[in-house]
Amino acid sequence: MISSFFHMLRGARVGFVLAREGALALVDPSVLPPLARGLIRVGRLIERRGAGSSATRLAAAMTRLGPSYVKFGQFLATRPDVVGMRIAQDLSALQDRMPAFPMAEARAIVEAAHGGKLEDLFVEFSEPVAAASIAQVHRARLKDGREVAVKILRPGIRDRFNRDLAAMRFGAETAEARSAEARRLRFSGVVETLARSVAMEMDLRLEAAALSEFAENTKGDTDFRVPEPDWQLTAREMLVDEWIDGVRLSDVEGLRAAGHDLPELARNIIQSFLKHAIRDGFFHADMHPGNLFVDAEGRLVAVDGGIMGRLGLKERRFLAEILLGFITRDYTRVAQVHFEAGYVPAHHDVADFAQAIRAVGEPIHDKSADQISMAKVLTLLFEITGMFDMATRTELVMLQKTMVVVEGVARTLDPHLDMWGTADPVVRSWITHNLGPLGRLEEAGRGARSLLGSLASLPDTVIRAERVLGQLEDASRHGFSLDEGSVEAIGRAEARRNRWGNLALWVIAGLLAYGLFG
């Protein structure tokens, strides 16, 4: 009860700041119940004059609320299905820039992590070169001459995030208890996804692990790389990886002056992202221009592995077939994939859903990137999810939003980029390998290995069953009586043991026969 009271106080503070900064002007009252409409009207009365544009209003409110809400705002920018496309676009402009904390505190964290003086680790250690809501970055030089980036967690940030997340959970649960739409959009799931993401971001060893996995996945790519972490110096509170010297993708004139092929870079960005998502199932989910560089060799370099997305094989197949369906304009297949994946309830009609998908796909075909509004495409897609009772898939929404960001970056380099033509070879290559004859053979091999693994464990299962039966028989001989139910249970166990043993023999014999004569 007391905790609920404090959560309501925190919620009231959030509402006051949003109202004061003018962010309530972004809310459409017509879609709200009467009580909420009344609260919005009251909130508008305290709006600060000259609040500015919608983007600056939201940015000012989130920044004033502190690091947790800056991160929450950035996260909601990836969820236009929840907040609407207009607010998501405004939140995309929110910069994760916070005042740096003092060098003395940074030094204390480094020395506590390694139990020695900072000078024992680094011969040079700069003032902060960047500061965000969770951590700040310093440039340093190791004793062996290597230049590194040192990312240090903000002091006390975990406790603050935990308090704010508890209030967000309370608000989400309250909304879901009162709104069917909130339940469909899984407000609690949104908060929990943010909580998991933040928990991983606040253990910098996990970010190092993400960078390491990312580097391993892309080691064969000649046009993309990520910085390797230094495991000996990385700790929970600090991450050390190589310093990247290159031109930021936001510096278009700098890229041009360095002699880089801008249209080729644009294609590389799109194709690299799709390879990571579809081929590897592990992608950088924060590929804005500040996190992307081009090195002296012309390779794309992605830094900051704090926000990563992961797709299972089912989701990767779904994505590949959806993209191919849009590329080939096979909207019936696109619809069927949604149904096969279980994303659309079976009581809906495939043909109706295909018709809705066509309304999304046809307007964007045979148009260059500068003629396509991906915001409009996403808006239509999310309208369709509501019409056909599709439950929100967080990982797919994050992927879709990241694709929009990636395309926006590519468009600044090549305004005439054909995204679908650029995506085609990556998608077809994956489908050919994974859904063609070779892919089916590999899938059969995985199934066979799984079956053989299960069969291999059967002898151990039989031995354990015999051991238990033997112990029960010994207990009976020594005067411990068994009731009728226990005797029946032993009989059933004996029957199962014989049945599994016989089945194992028949399966093994069948496999041998197939290997010899098949």
Image (cartoon, rainbow, N blue to C red):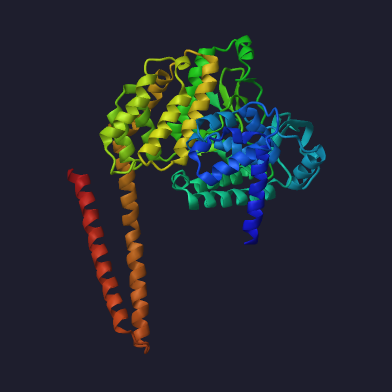
Q: Is residue 261 above or below residue 312?
A: above
Please state, as top left, top right, bottom left or bottom right, where the N terminus lies in the image. Answer: bottom right
Viewer-proximal residue among 319 and 126: 319
Q: Is residue 176 above or below residue 470?
A: above
Q: Is 421 on the left-hand or right-hand side of 115?
A: left
Q: Residue 313 appears in which quarter of the rendering? A: top left
Viewer-proximal residue among 19 and 444: 19
Where residue 202 appears, as percent x and y from the top left, is 64, 44
Asked whether residue 495 appears in the rendered view, the answer is: yes
Identify the residue at image location x=41%, y=22%: 423
Q: Is 86 on the left-hand or right-hand side of 135?
A: left
Identify the residue at image location x=69%, y=48%: 160
Please state, as top left, top right, bottom left or bottom right, where the C terminus lies in the image. Answer: top left
Number of numbered discs visible in the structure rendering: 0
Where residue 461 appears, as percent x and y from the top left, is 35, 64
Viewer-proximal residue among 415 and 380: 380
Q: Residue 356 appears in which quarter of the rendering? A: top left
Where residue 269 appears, as percent x and y from the top left, is 51, 22
Farthest residue, direction left:
517
Asked whether residue 428 appears in the rendered view, the answer is: no
Where residue 86 appears, as percent x and y from the top left, is 53, 29
Q: Is 295 on the left-hand or right-hand side of 102?
A: left
